[in-house]
């Protein structure tokens, strides 16, 4: 019995030794590798670059639409579309008869006042009296010219208003059916054609009612409304509607006993608003032109009375207060001359900078309205880039940032530019708030054309030769940011770090926590992370 008990003890002892040995073998011989689904890397020094990429377009650095400050008749156009011009070149002029007259009048008044000042200071002589008398004659001539110009302006502008009024009342006229014969009639209900120019000055409606008659077509029509009358229906040639210049012609197989309405003007026409606006613009131009001519007459009349008064005072002696007053008047005349010269300059459009004429929107003899562009000019070989940056990225963009530019039109070609302006305010485009950013090319290039579409990559920040790790290697929780560092091949520890610039190239700058050379986990799926935490 004792022998069996001893044998069992030995057997238990040997089994324990075997289990401990197997455990030791497993712990020292199992594979020293990380779980599947883990990617690793080594912390190195490198560059972290932050970039913003958007689509933009090329436009001239300088582009302007030019207009006259006052309306008038175009007298000369010295350029064509595509012409290259220099700064200060005369491009277009309008009629400047009144402005030239004002300059002559101002010069005459200045000469007269200067002569009067000389007389007050040194005393009158025959020569000064002759100058003053000549000034009176000159001013009287200018007054007569100003009155004639007023009459010419009134006649010209009234004719332009009359023409615009006729266009408004005569364009897009159409007859509208207001009653028909029966809905199942086999006859044509196509509107009669309205032709001619309405010469009346009264707005209203023509009503045309057809009735059976012995006319060649079998029908006649009765006109009421703006005029009253009758005539035969014709399908061959136009028949008059009253006596104010309008005619109508019915189609073949026209419907009998129908009634039509012709509104004057046709407010339902697609061209009505355009013609109405044009009419108002012409009326405004007339009022301004007539007012200017009337002011010129008043100014000339005042100067004529002043020159006559001065003539009677030429021989009088001067006192100090009169001399001072006359000096002030001479200064006033200098200012009037300068003002007249500015008014004359406003009848001339000059190139504000060297460039290319991109549009000419007027003809010689045309009456143009103040403020309406008649010429466009843009800089030549001097272009800039415009790009819209969303509010998400705009905080990163600053004046002075550099950019790489590529064109859809030039495969493989790259250009460089620099940010010169960032809009201070956002605009909403398709529901997104964007900021307009302007960039200038580093140098001119003949390949750059107005309107080309570009892809612009703006470098907003760069860190050179810093500790940089892939951004996806960083994970964050409420305690901060961490990186998983690998030790002894398979041991993983979480190391807290402080980050700097997060680059758009997938790298992030590390300010503290890593020194370089550490092996780290750059990516791990959820299953691998769970195994790492378990171990």
Image: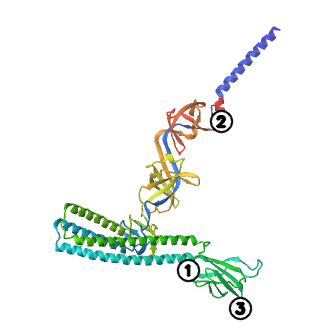
- Which is nearer the eye, 349 or 533? 349
Q: How is the image coloured?
A: rainbow
- Residue at the location (55% across, 40% down)? 470
Q: Which residue ends up furthest to the right in the rendered image?
A: 1
Secondary structure beneath label 3: loop
Name the front one of labels 1 and 2: 1
- Residue 407 x/y as whole percent: 51, 58
Quarter the N terminus occupies: top right
Indicate which disc, 1 or 2, sits on the residue closer to the N terminus: 1
Disc 1: CA contacts within 10 A as few (<14), some (14-19) or many (>=20)? some
Element carrying mark 1: loop
Q: Name the residue carrying label 2.
A: 528
Quadrant location of residue 20?
top right
Relative to the observer, which residue lies in front, 388 or 481? 388
Q: Horizontal placement of 495 versus 367: left or right?
A: right
Q: Quadrant of residue 95?
A: bottom left
First-in-chain label (2 vs 3): 3
Residue pointed to by mark 1: 200
User: Position of 23 compared to 284: left or right?
Assistant: right
Judge the density around disc 3: few (<14), some (14-19), many (≥20) Cα neighbours within 10 Å: few
Which numbered mark, 2 or 3, is in the foreground of this view?
3
- Regarding residue 365, the answer to whether it shows in the image is no
Whether residue 17 is visible, yes or no, is: yes
Q: Secondary structure beneath disc 2?
A: helix
Mark identifier at residue 214: 3
Q: Are marks 2 and 3 in contact (CB under 8 Å)?
A: no
Residue 195 at x, y = what percent? 60, 82
CA gap between label 1 and label 2 equals 93 Å
């Amino acid at each position: 019995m004792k022998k069996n008990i001893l044998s069992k003890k030995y057997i238990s002892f040997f089994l324990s030794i075997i289990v401990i040995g197997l455990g030791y073998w497993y712990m020292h011989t199992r594979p020293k590798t990380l779980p599947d689904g883990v990617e690793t890397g080594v912390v190195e020094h490198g560059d972290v670059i932050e970039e913003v990429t958007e689509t933009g377009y090329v436009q001239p650095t300088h582009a302007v639409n030019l207009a006259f400050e006052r309306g008038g008749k175009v007298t000369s156009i010295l350029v064509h579309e595509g012409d290259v011009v220099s700064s200060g070149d005369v491009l277009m002029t309008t009629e400047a008869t009144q402005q030239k007259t004002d300059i002559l009048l101002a010069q005459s008044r200045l000469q007269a006042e200067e002569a009067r000042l000389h007389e007050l200071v040194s005393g009158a002589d025959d020569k000064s009296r002759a100058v003053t008398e000549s000034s009176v004659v000159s001013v009287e001539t200018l007054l007569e010219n100003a009155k004639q110009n007023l009459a010419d302006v009134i006649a010209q502008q009234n004719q332009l208003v009359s023409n615009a009024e006729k266009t408004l009342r005569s364009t897009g006229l159409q007859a509208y059916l207001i009653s028909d014969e029966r809905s199942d009639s086999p006859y044509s209900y196509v509107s009669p054609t309205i032709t001619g120019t309405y010469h009346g000055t009264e707005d209203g409606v023509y009503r045309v009612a057809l009735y059976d008659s012995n006319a060649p077509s079998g029908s006649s029509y009765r006109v009421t409304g703006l005029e009253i009358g009758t005539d035969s229906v014709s399908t061959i040639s136009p028949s008059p509607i009253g006596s104010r210049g309008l005619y109508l012609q019915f189609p073949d197989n026209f419907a009998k006993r129908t009634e039509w309405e012709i509104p004057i003007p046709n407010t339902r026409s697609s061209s009505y608003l355009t013609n109405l606006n044009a009419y108002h613009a012409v009326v405004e131009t007339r009022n301004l032109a007539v007012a200017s001519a009337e002011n010129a007459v008043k100014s000339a009349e005042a100067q004529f009375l002043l020159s006559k008064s001065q003539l009677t005072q030429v021989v009088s002696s001067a006192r100090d207060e009169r001399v001072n007053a006359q000096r002030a008047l001479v200064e006033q005349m200098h200012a009037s001359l300068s003002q007249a010269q500015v008014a004359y300059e406003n009848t001339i459009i000059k190139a504000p900078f060297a460039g290319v004429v991109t549009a000419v929107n007027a003809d010689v003899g045309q009456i143009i309205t103040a403020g309406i562009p008649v010429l466009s000019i843009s800089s030549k070989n001097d272009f800039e880039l415009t790009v819209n940056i969303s509010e998400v990225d705009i905080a990163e963009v600053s004046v002075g940032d550099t950019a790489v530019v590529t064109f859809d039109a030039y495969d493989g070609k790259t250009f460089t530019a620099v940010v010169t302006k960032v809009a201070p305010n956002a605009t909403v485009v398709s529901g997104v708030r964007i900021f307009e950013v302007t960039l200038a090319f580093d140098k001119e290039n003949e390949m750059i054309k107005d309107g080309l579409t570009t892809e612009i990559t703006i470098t907003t920040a760069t860190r050179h030769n810093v500790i940089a790790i892939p951004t996806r290697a960083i994970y964050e929780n409420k305690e901060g940011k961490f990186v998983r560092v690998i030790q002894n091949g398979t041991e993983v520890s979480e190391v807290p770090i402080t980050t700097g610039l997060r680059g758009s190239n997938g790298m992030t700058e590390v300010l503290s926590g890593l020194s370089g050379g550490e092996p780290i986990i750059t990516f791990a799926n959820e299953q691998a992370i769970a195994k790492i935490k378990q171990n």
